[in-house]
Image (tube, grey):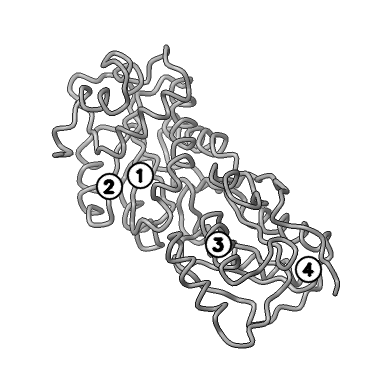
């Protein structure tokens, strides 16, 4: 389907709802429940729907999703994305902004810049999960109030709002230490997204805080896509005389689920032989065996905070001091982590 020709009828058919319901949601009006609203926005985003902006007189904010490589922003994380969108919708509605949602790939970065520059937006929220430092620098050169959501580069002069990755890793390390684990490994991602970089750095920081000695052989680098995670971790486990730690911290849940599959393929019992924990609290965590210990991210709160920061800059009519907002997640202990059993 030509994404430039997607209309309300197409979205209504895909969602199984009326055209008027789709119109209410996409025009940020009341009358549709949160779950259905999230579903319709997600479908519109994935179909590449572009709203007709003629005669719009309201204050306008754009929410722009940029998929750079698809290793993080993909079908597995659609629910994660939907909560971010719902948080933005809730807050922009309260503040009386018109919200427009669009989606782009990495090949369209130049297009995004020209698109933003020609539109009369009050401000922009960019979902920056997969963006690298150079992407942020490029986009932030646009002279318009802008907030980057779900990313953080500490040396850049931009507004960033994301989860507190450092605190999340502290909670996971503390949890495993309290269970008696003294040898903890890290399963890292080949994707160098800013959130994952911070989780990696925090892992080493908090092992040191708890006086846990790290062994270089307990570092595993895998792809973030599930099937490739299983393959990459399986290759490590196939090495002769591979001595494994008693616990593994995975930088996200998709990787954790793939790691559990690979461990089971090599006859490891989870958590009897190895405890495994993740990060994100994806719905799939509840459909695997064992249920995954993870960090729940307050996605709606994070998104609403991004809107608040953007709103303050819009209303001030001048550049605000650059704000970094990180919000703590919550440890969700489940079956995949347990007390260390000494042989």
The CA distance from mark 1 to mark 3 is: 30 Å
Q: Position of residue 66 (x, y in %)?
A: 33, 49
Q: Mark 1, residues whose alpha carbon is within 10 Å: few (<14), some, or many (≥20)?
A: many
Indicate left or right for 300 with 74 as reference: right
Ranked by sequence position, the earlier of labels 3 and 2 is 2
According to the picture, the residue beneath numbered tag 4 turns out to be 209
Q: Mark 3, residues whose alpha carbon is within 10 Å: few (<14), some, or many (≥20)?
A: many
Q: Position of residue 223 (x, y in %)?
A: 45, 67
According to the picture, the residue beneath numbered tag 3 turns out to be 261
The CA distance from mark 4 to mark 2 is: 41 Å
Pick the quarter of the image with the C terminus: bottom right
Tell me if residue 309 comes above or below residue 223 in the rendering. above
Mark 2 element type: strand
Q: Mark 4, residues whose alpha carbon is within 10 Å: few (<14), some, or many (≥20)?
A: few
Marks 1 & 2, CB-CB < 8 Å contact: yes
Tell me if residue 61 comes above or below residue 137 in the rendering. above
Marks 4 & 2, CB-CB < 8 Å contact: no
Ranked by sequence position, the earlier of labels 1 and 4 is 1
Indicate left or right for 84 with 198 as reference: left
Q: Which mark is residue 104?
A: 2
Q: Residue at x 15, y 37 (%)?
A: 4
Q: Residue at x 25, y 24 (%)?
A: 13
Ranked by sequence position, the earlier of labels 4 and 3 is 4
The CA distance from mark 1 to mark 2 is: 6 Å
Q: Nearer the viewer, mark 3 or mark 2?
A: 3
Q: Which mark is residue 65?
A: 1
Marks 3 & 2, CB-CB < 8 Å contact: no
Q: Nearer the viewer, mark 1 or mark 3?
A: 3
User: Is 268 in front, or is 97?
Assistant: 268
Q: Position of residue 210 (x, y in %)?
A: 80, 68
């Amino acid at each position: 389907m030509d994404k430039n020709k997607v209309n309300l009828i197409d979205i209504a058919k895909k969602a199984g709802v009326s055209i008027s319901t789709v119109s209410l949601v996409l025009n940020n009006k009341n009358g549709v429940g949160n779950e259905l609203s999230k579903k319709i926005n997600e479908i519109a985003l994935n179909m590449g729907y572009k709203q007709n902006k003629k005669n719009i007189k309201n204050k306008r904010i754009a929410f722009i999703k940029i998929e750079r490589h698809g290793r993080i922003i993909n079908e597995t994380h659609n629910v994660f994305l939907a909560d971010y969108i719902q948080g933005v919708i809730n807050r922009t509605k309260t503040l009386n902004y018109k919200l427009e949602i669009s989606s782009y790939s990495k090949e369209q970065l130049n297009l995004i810049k020209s698109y933003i520059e020609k539109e009369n937006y009050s401000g922009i929220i960019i979902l920056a999960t997969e963006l690298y430092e150079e992407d942020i620098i490029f986009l932030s050169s646009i002279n318009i109030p802008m907030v980057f959501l779900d990313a953080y580069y500490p040396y850049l002069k931009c507004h960033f709002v994301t989860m507190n990755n450092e605190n999340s890793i502290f909670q996971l390390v503390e949890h495993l230490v309290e269970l008696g684990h003294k040898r903890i490994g890290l399963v890292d991602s080949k994707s160098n997204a800013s959130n994952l970089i911070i989780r990696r750095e925090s892992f080493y920081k908090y092992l040191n805080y708890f006086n846990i000695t790290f062994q270089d052989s307990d570092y595993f680098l895998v792809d973030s896509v599930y099937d490739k995670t299983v393959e990459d971790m399986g290759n490590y486990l196939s090495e002769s005389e591979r001595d494994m730690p008693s616990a593994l911290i995975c930088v996200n849940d998709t990787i954790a689920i793939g790691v559990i599959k690979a461990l089971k393929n090599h006859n490891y019992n989870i958590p009897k032989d190895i405890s495994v924990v993740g990060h994100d609290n994806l719905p799939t965590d509840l459909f695997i065996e064992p249920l995954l210990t993870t960090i729940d991210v307050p996605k709606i709160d994070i998104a609403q905070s991004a809107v608040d920061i953007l709103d303050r800059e819009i209303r001030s009519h001048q550049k605000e001091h650059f704000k970094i907002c990180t919000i703590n997640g919550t440890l969700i202990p489940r079956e995949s982590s347990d007390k260390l059993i000494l042989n």
